[in-house]
Amino acid sequence: MEQPMVWRQWLARHDRIKDALPAIPLIVIAVAATAVGTSDWHEPRWDEVAWTALSCVPLAFRSLRPLGIALFTVLGDLTLMTVAPHIAPTPAASLVALYTLATLGSRRTAWLVGGVAAVAITGVHAATHMESVVGGASLLRFDFAIAATALGRAVLSRRENLAAARERAETAERRQEEEARRRVTEERVRIARDLHDVVAHHITLVNAQAGVAHHLMRANPEQAYEALAHIKDNSRAALDELRATVGLLRQPDDAPGSRSPVPRLADLDALVGGFKASGLSVQVARTGTPAPLAPATELTACRIIQEALTNTHKHACATGAAVVLDYGVDSLRVTVTDDGRPGTLKGAGTGHGLIGMRERATAIGGTVTAGPRPEGGFRVIAELPFSLAPTPV
């Protein structure tokens, strides 16, 4: 594979040599054709071979001046057919020049020159050989000239179709990449908005507890001290949430639905109920000892479960899914599996859902892995920390 590629690259840098290459098989064919006798082989007619080689010299410039070379070779072959009809070979160089003109020139020019050349070659051959214009040898030359032009136009059409298909593929790829970047950006903004809602919850508590502490500072110092302790805890949690926040937190044109309460694992049954109502059987199981989770962890777990079940419902030919919440020592493992059959999809996915899940998990220090199961179906596993790492002070 590498050797032909090297030759193609070398020929691409040497246009004149590439243009002259057809002369080699034409000369070989001329030698063989003139050496064929009625019953045996004889010495080639070197005058015809020499003229064939001489007529191929202009082909070295056929891609540089396709129209001029086509006219020059056709006139040369017509001149030889008129002056020396007894040695005039088939106008092979003219056929190559007509083919080149058809691949590089306009459609109108190619057919005009090709048609005139076919008629002229046929007429001159018939006149100099005392044959009918519709005779076998004359008609064969007419067919050759028309075929050379038609072949050139067919090759040009194929090249144009391939170029158009390549351009469409590149455009589609660029649009797909742009769409992926746009979707990822939107997902990051959505993550930031969700985290903002969680942080706003903490700030509200801090504000309320600060008011209580201010009110009780003189009347009941002990309760005021307790309120300040709560302020410290909530402010620390708020700082931890802010560490995971990225980009713009809230767009001014958000719809009212975007300010709805933050989802929590306590709402998981309601979430699963929606999928059950749509025909997907979902089983939920909890293992380990449930532990308090950071609001961002609960939010991320809910969003990952929602996205995984949505993908199952939209793309997998599955009848059931299972959600397992495994509470470990310091992390929550969320596993979502379905029983979809291998190779059966309702529709092609874009992969943005998996990107969004990984973005969410990474934002709070977790991980997400996803892929098909050996026994069939798909599995999503998310490892999420109970609480976010403290922010360095």
Image (cartoon, rainbow, N blue to C red):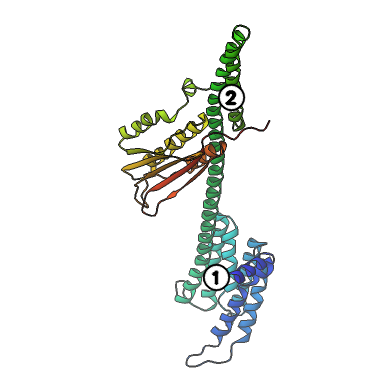
The image position of residue 24, as x and y in percent, is 61, 77
Residue occupying the point 67% across, 68% down: 10
Left or right of 13 in this view: 262: left
Res. 208 image quadrant = top right
Q: Is residue 59 visible?
A: no
Q: CA distance from mark 1 to mark 2?
A: 99 Å
Q: Secondary structure at mark 2?
A: helix
Number of numbered discs on residues: 2
Name the foreground residue: 281 vs 184.
Answer: 281
Residue at 39 percent across and 31 percent down: it is 268
Picture quadrant of residue 89: bottom right
Instruction: Please tell me how crowded label 2 is: few (under 14), some (14-19), or many (20+) other residues with Cα within 10 Å.
Output: few
> Which residue in the protein does label 1 denote?
121
At horizontal 46% and vertical 23% (from top left) the residue drawn is: 261
Image quadrant for the N terminus?
bottom right
Q: Mark 1 near mark 2, Cβ–Cβ under 8 Å?
A: no
Mark 1 Cα shell of 10 Å, populated few (<14), some (14-19), many (≥20): many
Give the mark nearer the N terminus: 1 vs 2.
1
Q: Residue 21 at x, y = what percent? A: 63, 72
- Vertical placement of 176 versus 104: above or below? above
Residue type marked 1: Ile
Would residue 317 appear left or right of 4 to someone viewing this image?
Answer: left
Image coords of residue 199 (percent x, y): 56, 25
**Residue at numbered disc 2:** 233
Q: Amino acid at mark 2?
A: Asp
Looking at the rendered structure, the secondary structure element under dot 1 is: helix
- Where is residue 171 shown, x and y percent of the image? 55, 46
